C-alpha cells in the first residue's frame, strides 16, 4: 500500500499543479496582478501547505527534528532541485526586481535560521533551540515580507501577463481550490507512503525530514514550477520557489516554534550552511550569468549539487 500511495500522491500532485497554474494565471490577468506576485503569494503558500501542516503536527506531537528538518530540507530542495530541474526543462529568465529584492530576502531567511541554529557558536548559552520568542521574530519578518509583496501587487498591473487564456472568475477560483486540494492531498499521501517505507529502514526523524518528507512536501512546488515554465510563465515558476522558501522559514517555523519550542537536534550547522550556500548561489547565478537567466547548464549544476547533498546525508545516516 505504501508504494500505491506514492504513485497516487504523485498523480494528484501533477493534476493539482496544472489546475492551480491555469486558475492562478487567469486570476492574475483579470485582476491586473503580475504572475510573479501570484507566484509569491497564492501559489507559493498553497504549495507550502503540506510543510505547514506537517511541521505544526510534528511540533504539537513532540517531533521537533521532523518539523525543522522538513523546512530545511524543503528549502534546499526548492533552490537546488526545483530551480535546477525547471531550468533544465526551460531556461528561467529572472526579473531585475526579483534579483534586487526577492532573492536577497530568501538569502536573509536562510541567514536568520543559520544564526538561530548556531547559538552555541555565537555565545548563546540556551543551546540550539527555536524558542517562542524566536518564532514571534520569524513571524514579524513574514509580516514585513507580506507588506512588501502586497505593495508590489498594487504597482504590478503593467506587468500582468496578457497572453493567458481568459477564464471566468468562478471557474478560475474553482481551479485554484481544486488544484490546491489535489496538491495537499497528493503531498499527504506521498509523504505517508514514503515515511512508512523510510521508518521501516530505521532512519532517524532528522534524516527523514531532510530527505523523504522534504522532497515529498516539495513535490507540489516542483510540479507547479515545471508546469509553469513549460507553459511560458516563468514569473510563477520563480515566484513559487521564492515565496515557498520565505513562507517555510518565516511562517511555518515561526508558527511552529510559537506553538512549541523546537530543538534542532540532528539538524546541524552543515545542513544550515548548505541551505545558506544554495540561496547565495541562486542569487549569484541569477545576477551575474546569462543576462539574468538561469540556464540549462546552471540548472544541471544545481540539481547535481542536490544529489550530492542527499548522497552525503544517506552515507552519514
Image: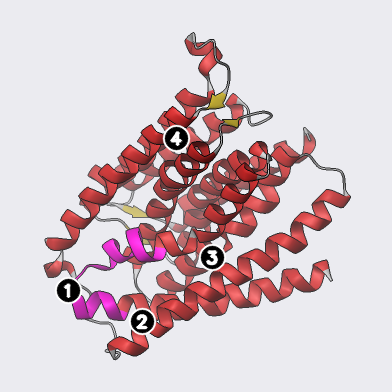
**Snapshot quadrant of residue 207:** top right
In the displayed structure, 156 sits above or below 307; it is below
Name the spot of residue 196 as percent of width and height, x first: 81, 57
Asked if labels 4 and 1 touch by Cβ distance under 8 angstroms, the answer is: no
Name the element at disc 1.
Answer: loop
Query: Image point 54% across, 31% down: which residue?
Result: 272
Q: Which residue is mark 2?
A: 173
Q: Which residue is mark 4?
A: 135
Instruction: Tell me the distance, in whole angstroms, between the alpha carbons under discs 1 and 3.
Output: 25 Å
Q: Which mark is residue 64?
A: none
Name the spot of residue 235 as percent of width and height, x first: 31, 64
Instruction: Tell me the distance, in whole angstroms, between the alpha carbons under discs 4 and 3.
Output: 25 Å
Mark 3 surroundings within 10 Å by alpha-carbon count, few (fewer than 14), some (14 through 19), many (20 or more)? many
Q: Which residue is mark 3?
A: 220
User: Is residue 213 found left or right of 32 in the rendered image?
Assistant: right
Name the spot of residue 315 as percent of width and height, x first: 79, 36
Q: Name the mark nearer the viewer: 4 or 2.
A: 4
Query: Image point 27% across, 50% down: which residue?
Result: 146
Name the element at disc 3.
Answer: helix
Instruction: Tell me the distance, in whole angstroms, between the alpha carbons under discs 1 and 4.
Output: 34 Å
N-terminal label among 1 and 4: 1
N-terminal label among 2 and 3: 2
Queried whether the magenta region covers residue 235, the answer comes back as no
Name the element at disc 2.
Answer: helix
Nearer to me, 18 or 181: 181
Q: Which residues are magenta?
A: 26-43
N-terminal label among 1 and 2: 1
Q: Which mark is residue 32?
A: 1
Amino acid at each position: 500500500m505504501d508504494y500505491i500511495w506514492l504513485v497516487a500522491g504523485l498523480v494528484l500532485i501533477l493534476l493539482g499543479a496544472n489546475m492551480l497554474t491555469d486558475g492562478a494565471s487567469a486570476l492574475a490577468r483579470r485582476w491586473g496582478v503580475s504572475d510573479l506576485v501570484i507566484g509569491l503569494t497564492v501559489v507559493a503558500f498553497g504549495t507550502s501547505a503540506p510543510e505547514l501542516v506537517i511541521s505544526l503536527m510534528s511540533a504539537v506531537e513532540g517531533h521537533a527534528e521532523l518539523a525543522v528538518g522538513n523546512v530545511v530540507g524543503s528549502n534546499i530542495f526548492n533552490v537546488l532541485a526545483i530551480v535546477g530541474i525547471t531550468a533544465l526543462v526551460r531556461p528561467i529568465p529572472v526579473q531585475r526586481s526579483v534579483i534586487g529584492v526577492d532573492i536577497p530576502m530568501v538569502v536573509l531567511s536562510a541567514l536568520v535560521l543559520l544564526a538561530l541554529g548556531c547559538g552555541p557558536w555565537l555565545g548563546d548559552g540556551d543551546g540550539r533551540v527555536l524558542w517562542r520568542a524566536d518564532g514571534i521574530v520569524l513571524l514579524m519578518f513574514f509580516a514585513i515580507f507580506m507588506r512588501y509583496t502586497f505593495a508590489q501587487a498594487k504597482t504590478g498591473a503593467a506587468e500582468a501577463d496578457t497572453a493567458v487564456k481568459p477564464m471566468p472568475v468562478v471557474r478560475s477560483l474553482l481551479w485554484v481550490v481544486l488544484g490546491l486540494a489535489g496538491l495537499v492531498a497528493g503531498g499527504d499521501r506521498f509523504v505517508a507512503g514514503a515515511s512508512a517505507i523510510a521508518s521501516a529502514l530505521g532512519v532517524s526523524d532528522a534524516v527523514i525530514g531532510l530527505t523523504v518528507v522534504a522532497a515529498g512536501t516539495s513535490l507540489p512546488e516542483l510540479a507547479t514550477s515545471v508546469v509553469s515554465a513549460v507553459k511560458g510563465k516563468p514569473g510563477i515558476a520563480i515566484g513559487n520557489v521564492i515565496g515557498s522558501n520565505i513562507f517555510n522559514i518565516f511562517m511555518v517555523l515561526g508558527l511552529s516554534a510559537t506553538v512549541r519550542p523546537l530543538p534542532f537536534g540532528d539538524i546541524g550547522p552543515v545542513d544550515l550552511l548548505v541551505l545558506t550556500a544554495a540561496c547565495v548561489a541562486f542569487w549569484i547565478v541569477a545576477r551575474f550569468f546569462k543576462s539574468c537567466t538561469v540556464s540549462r547548464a546552471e540548472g544541471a549544476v544545481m540539481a547535481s549539487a542536490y544529489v550530492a547533498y542527499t548522497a552525503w546525508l544517506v552515507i552519514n545516516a
